[in-house]
Amino acid sequence: MAHTSNLQKNWYSILGASPSDDLHELKQKYQRLVLMFHPDKQKPGLSEEEADQRLRRFLEVDQAWKVLGNQESRRTFDLQLRADELKQSWPVDACVVSGDMSWDSEGRTYSYGCRCGGDFVLTEEEMEDGAVVCCDTCSLSIQVKSVT
Ligand SMILES: [Zn+2]
């Protein structure tokens, strides 16, 4: 099977779950899906294609639980997921000229207000042309253009 993402599959979405779900919630979602797709639980008269699809879903759900139901492999997957999301969020939402950022001489940081109400904060050392900053509240990011 060919997958374009770095991640083989997003096990959370396969379970209809989210990364913030705890183990108990994950297990409930897993059990519900397993019952729904288990080959032994299918109604007679399913077309071969449909039965095949359900079997594939069952195997996916089973695999998802093997990854997420285990603390160790879940943590590994969470890290992959975060790295993947970070890469996807690279396309920056806006470019900001460094002169438009406000300079805080006490904290020695530059900041710029995000539309969510949060802030893009950059330390003096991080300030350079092309630096990408993530909002401290939401997932937007900006790229800094320093004018020389
Ligand atoms: Zn924001």
Image (cartoon, helix red, strand yellow):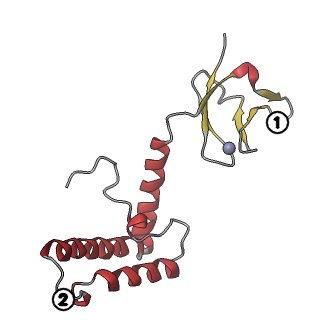
Q: What amino acid is at disc 2? A: Pro
Numbered badge on residue 118: none
Say which quadrant the N terminus sits in. bottom left
Q: Quadrant of residue 135?
A: top right
Labelled pair 1, 2 in contact (Cβ < 8 Å): no
- Against 76, residue 37 (above or below) is below
For disc 1, the marked residue is: 107
Query: Which mark sits nearer the N-terminus, 1 or 2?
Result: 2
Q: Nearer the viewer, residue 11 or 53?
A: 53
Taking the image in four quarters, ligand 1 sits in the one at: top right
Give the secondary structure at mark 1.
Answer: loop
Taking 104 as reference, is 2 left or right?
left
The structure residue drawn at horizontal position 37% and vertical position 79%, both measured from the top left corner, is 33
- Against 40, residue 136 (above or below) is above
Taking 132 as reference, is 123 left or right?
right
Taking 113 as reference, is 55 left or right?
left
Disc 1 to disc 2, C-alpha distance: 69 Å
For disc 2, the marked residue is: 44
Q: Position of residue 144 (x, y in %)?
A: 63, 25
